[in-house]
Amino acid sequence: QSALTQPPSASGSPGQSVTISCAGTSSDIGDYSYVSWYQQHPGKAPKLMIYELSKRPSGVPDRFSGSKSGNAASLTVSGLQDEDEAEYYCSTYIPFTNSWVFGAGTKLTVL
Amino acid sequence: EVQLVESGGDLVQPGGSLRLSCAASGFTFRLYSMIWVRQAPGKGLEWVSYFSDNLFTRSYADSVEGRFTISRDNAQNSLYLQMNSLRVEDTAVYYCARVRGSSGWLDVWGQGTLVTVSS
């Protein structure tokens, strides 16, 4: 199973919106709504930000939103704040193999 | 508080073995599937292995198949990863994570334990 494709970097100024893309195939993102997004600050464990394409766990600000179009998913961060600066990973679960695929990560910089 | 705590990471020579542990607390461990995910220094996340809540299903990434074995002890609320024939490229921080729902999102992560394979 190939890794999902993410841009290596993204940036925006405080208050702006930024969207991070995650490209997959018809066998993973295209077939299922099993995409989740994780935020990771340096030296810390990943944190779940979005699951099932667009759902937010309790405690995650509504500035974070997710969507899907065809074989690609996206994470949008609105009203950027300094604490949003982190690495973001998309992931999808492949049920028929009980496996997970991650993107390579996108470093989000708040200018 | 729902918590996962990994332990067992160490410096080991190529070809050596190591056993990682993940202690769960604050939730009913036996009701959840669990996975191991690793992150090589400066690199991204890589799924390693999965163990289902019903104890029937285990799976492994191709990169560790035949060398790593996942297990769990529900009485001890613990998940394990036995790593044999370790390679330099297995050097990474290893995280355990809790699996939620049929769509496999990972809602709780441990802090990670560092495995370094080097001569």
Image (cartoon, coloured by chain):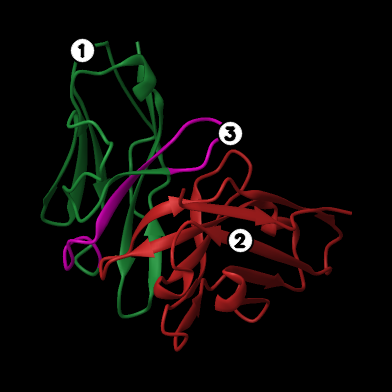
Q: Is residue A39 magenta?
A: yes
> Where residue B27 sits: x, y (%)?
44, 61
> Where residue B58 sits: x, y (%)?
49, 81
Tell me where the magenta segment starts and ends, as one range: A28-46
How much space separates mark 2 and mark 3, taking CA atoms? Answer: 20 Å
At label 1, which amino acid type do we have?
A: Gly
- Image chain in red: B
Give me the residue at 86% from left, 60% from top. B13
Q: Residue furthest right?
A: B119
Element marked by disc 3:
loop
- Asked if one can make out residue B71 in the rendered structure from this viewpoint, the answer is no
How much space separates mark 1 and mark 3, taking CA atoms? Answer: 26 Å
Q: Quadrant of residue B63?
A: bottom right
Disc 1 vs disc 3: Cβ atoms closer than 8 Å? no
Give me the residue at 74% from left, 58% from top. B8
Give me the residue at 63% from left, 42% from top. B41
Chain where mark 2 sits: B
Report which residue position mark 3 lands on. Answer: A43
Q: Is residue B9 left or right of residue A66?
A: right
User: Does B38 sit above or below residue A106?
Assistant: below
User: Does A20 sit above or below residue B34?
Assistant: above
User: Any mark on residue B52, and which?
Assistant: none
Q: Residue furthest bottom?
A: B56
User: Any mark on residue A15, and which?
Assistant: 1
Element marked by disc 2:
strand
User: Any mark on residue B23, and which?
Assistant: 2
